[in-house]
Image (cartoon, grey):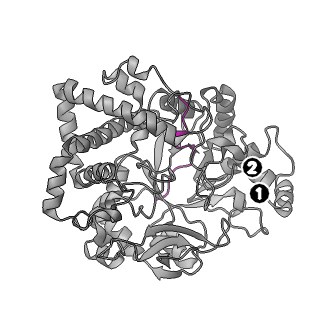
């Protein structure tokens, strides 16, 4: 579906400032929403909100439905009477500009456990009913997820494929035994999900009341070590005895990597999924639309054809393209859910069948200005070649910042093309020149990473694809949200017709 002309900011909640080592859904989140409103922005794009595992990537989560407990605000818990001032007194000396995930987890999980114990004994009748209602309403994924997390905590292994066979294969009597054994741990994980979604829902409501819509993000694949794969192995290409993947996901060599990207996620068993009218996918989209106003589908091209790599390969080079039932999938989702407010991440190797699938359903695609200057005037990412039904970005979470790209990654040819295209440098530098290009384009939506608003270099990059660690940890400081930046953004949206007062 086409969207009205507007603009917004790309920022994941982990990047908020605050004294607890990681961004959360407390006061700083509301300050950011206020900044968006003052700046005339109508969109806030986030990364996936799920509970992250090894590597801390929001694209490799323990669940496609659950929320990340590390985003729960301790201050909000204190306001509810679930934590005391003493509980929040001895806070480690967390770094201000990045996240030390191990340090955050070591401090925050015990604090969340204390809040859970207080909830058990102090929750009001209304809170208890809200909790019970949440657990009933989300039972179709919450029961499996909370048991899965409790088992991960107690089995002494890092992945479910190392569990005893009767747990791997989910023998009903064994599952019931462990549910009884792990009652307290399961309750803890249910509490975390209840509190995460309560805090998130309040923040989303606050944003919506200020005419700001949230763009969520659905990774096309799920992590192998996830509740989704353990609880529904039939949906994936797995060895039925070991649970290990027989085919894994990735992409062929591209702009980001000469050997491609070997993600390692298990490939879907599309024949089985189609026989169920894509029940799991429909439920997944429904859950995401309950917590976001629009959703970006990451690696959209994999829903037309996907790169399948035999398990055991060390790179993605030896994969092959396999057709996916994208038309049937989206027709079914539309029949079940109605209008689809979906943005297609159509980057990388894209052929005509992918464009046909995208355009058949009217999904806007993505245009990245960092990709616009490596060839001639026919480059599809140049602002004058962009079609209206698209979303234009200076860069995404997988790109360098614009300053980092221009001064470190761009070729001499690209820098020369940029200078000739712009004609001159603006007063605020290359990042704001690119912001102006995005805002002035005919694309219905323009999204700017907050790092570009702040004129930051490569040290503020969010993710480097194919780099195993050191990603996802950038944070800004509260004082960075200045009136100067707000006024500049507001002026831009007024000049280029993206403001709806």
For the C terminus, the image quarter is: top right
Q: Which residue is mark 2?
A: 404
Left/right placement of residue 409 relative to residue 42 reads: right
For the N terminus, the image quarter is: bottom left
Badge 2 marks a residue whose secondary structure is helix
Left/right placement of residue 242 relative to residue 138 reads: right
Q: Quadrant of residue 329?
A: bottom left
Q: Which residue is mark 1?
A: 409
Q: Are marks 2 and 1 in contact (CB under 8 Å)?
A: yes
Front residue (pair 5, 229): 229
Does 250 appear above or below 444?
Answer: below
Badge 1 marks a residue whose secondary structure is helix
Q: Quadrant of residue 281?
A: bottom left
Which residue appears farthest toward the left when viewing the image?
A: 173
- Residue at figure coordinates x 54%, y 35% from the top left: 16
Please provide percent x and percent y for residue 283.
Answer: 30, 59
Front residue (pair 169, 463): 169
Left/right placement of residue 113 relative to residue 475 reads: left
> Magenta stretch?
1-18
Separation of marks 2 and 1 at Cα, in angstroms: 7 Å
Does 366 appear above or below 49?
Answer: below
Please provide percent x and percent y for residue 10.
Answer: 57, 45
How many numbered discs sit on the rendered protein? 2
């Amino acid at each position: 579906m086409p969207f009205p002309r507007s603009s917004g900011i790309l920022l994941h909640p982990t990047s908020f400032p605050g004294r607890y080592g990681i961004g959360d859904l407390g006061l700083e989140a509301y300050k950011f929403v206020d900044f968006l409103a003052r700046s005339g922005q109508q969109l806030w794009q986030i990364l996936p909100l799920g509970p992250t595992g090894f590597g801390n990537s929001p694209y490799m989560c323990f669940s496609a439905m659950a929320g990340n407990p590390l985003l729960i605000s301790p201050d909000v818990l204190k306001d509810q009477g679930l934590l005391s001032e003493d509980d929040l007194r001895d806070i480690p000396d967390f770094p201000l500009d990045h996240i030390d995930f191990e340090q955050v987890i070591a401090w925050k999980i015990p604090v969340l456990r204390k809040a859970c114990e207080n909830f058990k004994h102090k929750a009001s009748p209304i809170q208890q009913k809200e909790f019970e209602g949440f657990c009933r309403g989300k039972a179709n994924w919450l029961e499996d997820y909370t048991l899965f997390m409790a088992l991960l905590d107690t089995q002494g292994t890092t992945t479910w494929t190392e569990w005893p066979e009767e747990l791997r294969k989910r023998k009903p009597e064994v599952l019931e035994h462990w549910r009884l054994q792990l009652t307290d741990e399961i309750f803890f994980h249910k509490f975390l999900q209840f509190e995460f979604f309560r805090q998130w829902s309040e923040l989303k409501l606050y944003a919506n009341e200020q005419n700001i819509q949230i763009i969520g993000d659905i990774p096309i694949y799920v992590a192998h070590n996830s509740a989704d794969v353990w609880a529904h192995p039939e949906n994936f290409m797995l060895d039925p005895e070991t649970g290990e993947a027989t085919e894994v996901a990735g992409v062929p060599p591209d702009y980001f990597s000469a050997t491609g990207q070997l993600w390692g996620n298990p490939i879907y068993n599309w024949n089985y999924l189609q026989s169920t009218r894509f029940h799991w996918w429909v439920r997944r989209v429904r859950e995401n639309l309950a917590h976001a106003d629009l959703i970006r589908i990451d690696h959209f091209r994999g829903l037309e054809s996907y790169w399948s790599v035999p398990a055991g390969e060390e790179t993605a080079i030896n994969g092959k393209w396999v057709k996916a039932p994208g038309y049937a999938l989206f027709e079914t989702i539309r029949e079940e859910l109605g209008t689809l407010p979906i943005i297609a991440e159509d980057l990388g190797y894209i052929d005509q069948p992918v464009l046909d699938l995208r355009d058949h359903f009217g999904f806007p695609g993505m245009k990245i200005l960092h990709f616009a200057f490596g060839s001639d005037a026919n480059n599809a990412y140049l602002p004058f070649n962009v079609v209206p039904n698209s979303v234009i970005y200076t860069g995404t979470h997988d790109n360098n910042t614009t300053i980092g790209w221009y001064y470190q990654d761009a070729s001499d040819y690209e820098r020369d093309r940029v200078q000739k295209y712009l004609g001159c440098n603006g007063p605020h530098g290359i990042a704001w020149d690119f912001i102006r290009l995005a805002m002035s384009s005919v694309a219905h939506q323009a999204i700017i990473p907050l790092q570009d608003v702040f004129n930051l270099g490569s040290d503020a990059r969010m993710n480097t694809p194919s780099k195993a660690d050191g990603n996802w940890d950038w944070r800004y400081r509260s004082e960075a949200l200045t009136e100067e930046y707000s006024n500049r953004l507001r002026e831009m949206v007024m000049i280029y017709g993206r403001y709806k007062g």
